[in-house]
Image: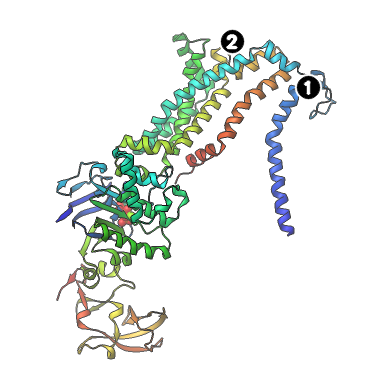
Amino acid sequence: MLKKILSKAGFCGGLAFFIVFSASPFYIMLITMFKKSHDLFNPTNNPFILNEPFTAEHVKLLFTQTLYTTFLLNTLYVGVAVVLITVALSVPAAFSLARIAGRWGENLGIGIFLTYLIPPTLLFIPLSRIISVLGLQNSLWSLVLVYPTFTVPFCTWLLMSFIKSIPREIEEQALIDGCSRLGALVKVILPLSVPGIITIIVFAFTLVANEYIYALAFIQDSAKKTIGIGLTTELVRGDVFYWGALMGGALIASIPVALLYTFFLDRIISGLAMGTVRR
Amino acid sequence: MAIVELKGISKSFGQVRAVDGVDVEIKDGEFLVLLGPSGSGKTTLMRLCAGLERPTGGSIVIDGSVVNDVPPRERGIAMVFQSYALYPHKTVFRNIAFPLTVEGMDKAEIRKKVEWAAGLLGIGHLLDRMPSQVSGGEKQRVAIARALVRRPKVLLMDEPLSNLDAKVRHSARDELKKFQREIGVTTIYVTHDQAEAMGLGDRIAVMHEGKVRQIGTPDDIYHYPADTFVAGFVGTPPMNFIEKDGLLTGFRPELFHPAELISDQDPVRFRFRIERVENLGAYSLAYGTIGSVKVIANLSPRLRIREGEERDFGVSRQDVRYFDKQTGAGIRR
Ligand SMILES: Nc1ncnc2c1ncn2[C@@H]1O[C@H](COP(=O)(O)OP(=O)(O)O)[C@@H](O)[C@H]1O
Ligand SMILES: [Mg+2]
């Protein structure tokens, strides 16, 4: 009996720890967003609560004195375009590497993943040449063009291991049941890959929303900035950090992504698990 | 009339010769069992028939035409995989209907045929379930119904009972045979379980290391094994072998009796030292030696036998088989 209570308590304790651990950044962001600057900058105040009445001045600043909604829309715009390109390229690439190319596919898959490991901090230099040759400086299209260089390899690799985990016999069964190779892919393997495809959509979008270096290097106009650089360049003026607005902007931008994850959590987990555990 | 002919079929994977020159003819309506230990090339041979692998040598003839270069969908075959390979995202109905849907058959016709196949296998009440919601035995029936719905010329089955637990396996075997007789579909059936092979097959092809060692009726295989491999593989416990007069003498444990119980006037006699007796209810197994060779006798449990005693045992002359000492090939006398 005692043992049962103890194990239950241990479980709840662990759960509570992780809830606090993962929710506290959001809590800090939330209260900072509504804290008076005077309250925030006073080191004798308890940092975890509102010591003075709340204020909406930071939120007002965010929406009236920066192009915050434009940043959000730009991110959405680039995100959707990049997701479309990524899906269009990754899905057929992953299928053919996983199923048709045999041993070659394995090595090519590893090669593709390796390109993902080259850091953007190196790549942005040659890529900026290409962007200027194409005349895309200071245009959102530069990001639409460049982001797939990391979303496609990553998503191809993820989807490839996902497709590999679909038993080959299911596909062979489709061949016997009257499908051609292509028919088997479209009618059987594609529907079974939906969790994997949802996973790469979410990942591609998140990678885009998080990207910083390319956006910083290629975009100068405030009206064309995405959320990542928009907030940090417009709300850090000289050595003045507009903490309340920064936190508010980051928090609001993270809400749709959080919703996306929550909504598709089961599928994403099964997508990731199937992708990583080989049978 | 032979509906499937395999002529000198071979398949190598790199250095591994998975199937090595197999010649088999399967008659229309026949139930042929491919029997062999794991790794003997049974699955590969079946996949060659299905068109999932291309042979490296020889030819496959189905219903009169060479199908070496014909894709699986045009061979008129159906296959039940060991794992059943049900489409996990489709209901049972849509699983069974899938081969017909692909053909573009109209809805009413599909429903009629699916209901026929489901009725045949007694799974009519499961049609709206998902594969994850049915038991192992039911999954197997769904897979068979899906295979039969198109009325294939040849039905291929790869160890379809091996994923079932022992209890269900017995009744499933019985039903398999019944419906195969009922619709008379030519069947090639793979198994490593010799009891399953003996119970199901009209004929059995025993495979070893990619070669067919013997083809024949269960009786033939059991009583007139072509070589020591077949003799040792079929039957539990396996045939006993004793070296005698320059030949290998083989006899079945259940035909090895105390000498006084044999009606034959002149049996082949052995001095049997019994070391251990296992009473298994229906029969008992006596483990012991003749000379220094280990031998097993399958005896009636009513027989009074003591561990440690040495007795005159024998085998009726007509029940003894002879094999070449070097090659293991059977010698007819
Ligand atoms: N795709 C393959 N690639 C390489 N070797 C294979 C392949 N399929 C089967 N083999 C080999 O061929 C032999 C026969 O295999 P298999 O036909 O599966 O035997 P069984 O079904 O009788 O157990 C084994 O040695 C196996 O390792
Ligand atoms: Mg096998």
Numbered badge on residue A35: 1
Q: Which residue is mark 2?
A: A223
- Amino acid found under the numbered disc labelled 2: Ala
Q: Nearer the viewer, residue B216 or A260?
A: A260
- Badge 1 crowding class, 10 Å Cα cut-off, few under 14, some 14 to 19, many 20 or more, is many
Image coloring type: rainbow
Q: Which image quadrant shows ligand 2?
A: bottom left
Identify the mark nearer the N-term, 2 or 1. Answer: 1
Q: Give the side of residue B122 with respect to residue A148, left or right.
A: left
**Residue placed furthest toward the right:** A44
Q: Position of residue A24 (x, y in %)?
A: 71, 33
- Chain letter behind tag 2: A
Within the image, what quadrant is residue B175 found in? bottom left
Q: Position of residue B199 (x, y in %)?
A: 30, 67
Q: Which SS class for mark 2?
A: helix
Q: Residue at x 23, y 71 (%)?
A: B219
Q: CA distance from mark 2 to mark 1?
A: 28 Å
